[in-house]
């Protein structure tokens, strides 16, 4: 075994460190999920029913994170994965302080801009780094473990900060939790994380010398080291398969934005307490994260296409069910259904991109896919914010997102194809 051997077992120590990193990345975004939207009126001066203003911080987050995903992929191929990860955590340091000191909602929006930079740099790198050091037949499992760790972190942080807000108050609770997470992540990055760019470079060199038995269906007539705009065109419209994956990634983020912005407000209006709200929103995250332990691995055996399309439609159905019933049990089951749909599609959309992009520019391709995907936060928040504003009913936001998921799943069904290199070889 060489130092640059590919495989989870062969690189278990570094793989584990990257899982811890993405857990902490999930903590960082999760601390804003429950407390901030629920207490926007009482703590930060957002008028009741101001759906567009309430959505502003997620719009800002999505736009900034989308751009940073794009930048992170290209930057990591020049300076390495570890340096980009470290930059992301340094940028996160002011976030808890800004939230704690915020005199109005504008500060929350500004803090969320920094959070978008942090998430774009850090989550992109944890994902890319794991793909660097694992084999092609482990991509589904790799993506599943990555997203399991991250979204369990999101869910846990939502529950923990809800309790912290009740014990310490919203501002102090978020300050203590946030600083503990960011400082821990910085120390672990400096001391234990290794740069995985050499693995990607070694894989590229090996690929030139010895093509594998089952070649992925890479885009044709593409330069060995394409320019950024060429990769962007391939991901966005030139290659129909990659475009189908990018649009599905964009629309599925409508769901996450809805759960972040509208679901806490909806539950509060229905009489749920802050901790009940934390657990209901947490069910979505726990099911999403936990189920990815097997949905990613499942796609390594059965393929990506079926889980991706079914996931879009199951997730949309879960969203549609939330406003149709009443009570914590109903909301938890519906949220869990949406989370299971997300678990089917989330790791496997990313694995599909990795299947059909060569290692020489895979980091860029994943960064551009993540650009479109996280742009969905901003577009989705604007869409359901307008829907709720124009109708005067928060339920309209749920219908907007559900219909978008059904339509996007149909596009993926007609434009997409099976990408697994064994099940659909070149």
Image (cartoon, rainbow, N blue to C red):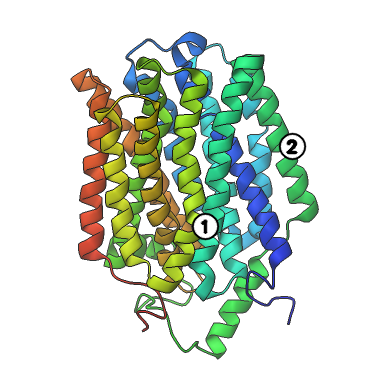
Tell me where residue 76 appears, x and y as whole percent. 59, 58
For residue 367, above or below residue 199: above
Tell me where residue 267 appears, x and y as whole percent. 38, 22
Q: Can you name the residue that lies furthest to the right here?
A: 191
Residue to which mark 1 is pinned: 293
Viewer-nearest residue: 230 or 407: 407
| Quarter of the image where the C terminus is located | bottom left
Where on the picture, by quarter, is residue 338?
top left
Tell me where residue 147 appears, x and y as whole percent. 52, 52
Gap in Å between the C-alphas at discs 2 and 1?
28 Å
For residue 310, above or below residue 87: below
How many other residues sit within 10 Å of disc 2, few (<14), some (14-19) or many (≥20)? some
Horizontally, residue 115 falls left or right of residue 14, namely: left
User: Residue shown at 45%/22% (left/top)?
Assistant: 37
The mark that comes first in sequence, 2 or 1, is: 2
Tell me the number on the disc at residue 183: 2
Viewer-nearest residue: 15 or 129: 15
Tell me where residue 189 appears, x and y as whole percent. 73, 50
Tell me the number on the disc at residue 202: none
Q: Nearer the viewer, mark 2 or mark 1?
A: 1
């Amino acid at each position: 075994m060489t130092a640059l051997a590919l495989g989870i077992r062969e690189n278990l120590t570094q793989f584990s460190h990257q899982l811890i990193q993405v857990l902490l990345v999930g903590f960082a975004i999760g601390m804003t999920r429950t407390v901030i939207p629920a207490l926007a009126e009482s703590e930060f001066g957002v008028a009741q029913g101001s759906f567009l203003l309430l959505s502003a911080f997620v719009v800002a987050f999505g736009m900034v994170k989308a751009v940073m995903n794009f930048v992170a992929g290209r930057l990591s191929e020049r300076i390495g994965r570890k340096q980009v990860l470290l930059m992301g955590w340094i940028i996160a340091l002011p976030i808890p302080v800004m939230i704690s000191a915020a005199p109005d909602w504008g500060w929350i929006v500004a803090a969320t801009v920094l959070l978008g930079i942090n998430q774009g740099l850090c989550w992109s790198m944890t994902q890319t780094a794991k793909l660097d050091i694992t084999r092609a037949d482990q991509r589904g499992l790799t993506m599943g473990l990555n997203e399991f760790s991250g979204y369990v972190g999101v869910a846990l942080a939502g529950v923990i900060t809800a309790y912290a807000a009740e014990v310490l108050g919203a501002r102090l609770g978020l300050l203590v939790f946030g600083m503990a997470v960011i400082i821990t992540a910085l120390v672990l990055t400096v001391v234990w994380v290794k740069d995985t760019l050499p693995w990607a470079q070694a894989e590229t060199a090996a690929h030139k010398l010895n093509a594998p038995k089952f070649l992925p269906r890479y885009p044709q007539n593409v330069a060995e080291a394409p320019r950024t705009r060429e990769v962007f065109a391939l991901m966005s419209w030139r290659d129909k398969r990659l475009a189908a994956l990018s649009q599905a990634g964009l629309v599925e983020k409508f769901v996450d934005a809805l759960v972040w912005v509208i679901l806490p407000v909806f539950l509060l209006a229905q009489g749920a307490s802050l901790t009940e709200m934390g657990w209901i929103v947490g069910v979505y995250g726990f099911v999403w994260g936990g189920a990815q332990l097997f949905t990613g691995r499942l796609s390594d055996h059965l393929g990506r296409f079926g889980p991706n399309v079914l996931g879009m439609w199951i997730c949309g159905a879960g969203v549609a069910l939330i406003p149709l019933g009443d009570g914590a049990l109903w909301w938890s089951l519906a949220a869990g259904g949406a989370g299971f749909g997300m678990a089917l599609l989330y790791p496997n959309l990313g694995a599909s991109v990795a299947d059909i992009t060569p290692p020489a520019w895979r980091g860029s391709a994943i960064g551009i896919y993540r650009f479109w995907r996280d742009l969905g936060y901003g577009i989705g928040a604007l869409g359901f914010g307008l829907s709720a504003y124009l109708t005067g009913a928060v339920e309209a936001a749920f219908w907007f997102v559900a219909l978008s998921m059904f339509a996007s799943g149909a596009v993926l069904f007609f434009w997409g194809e099976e990408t697994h290199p064994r099940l659909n070889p070149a």
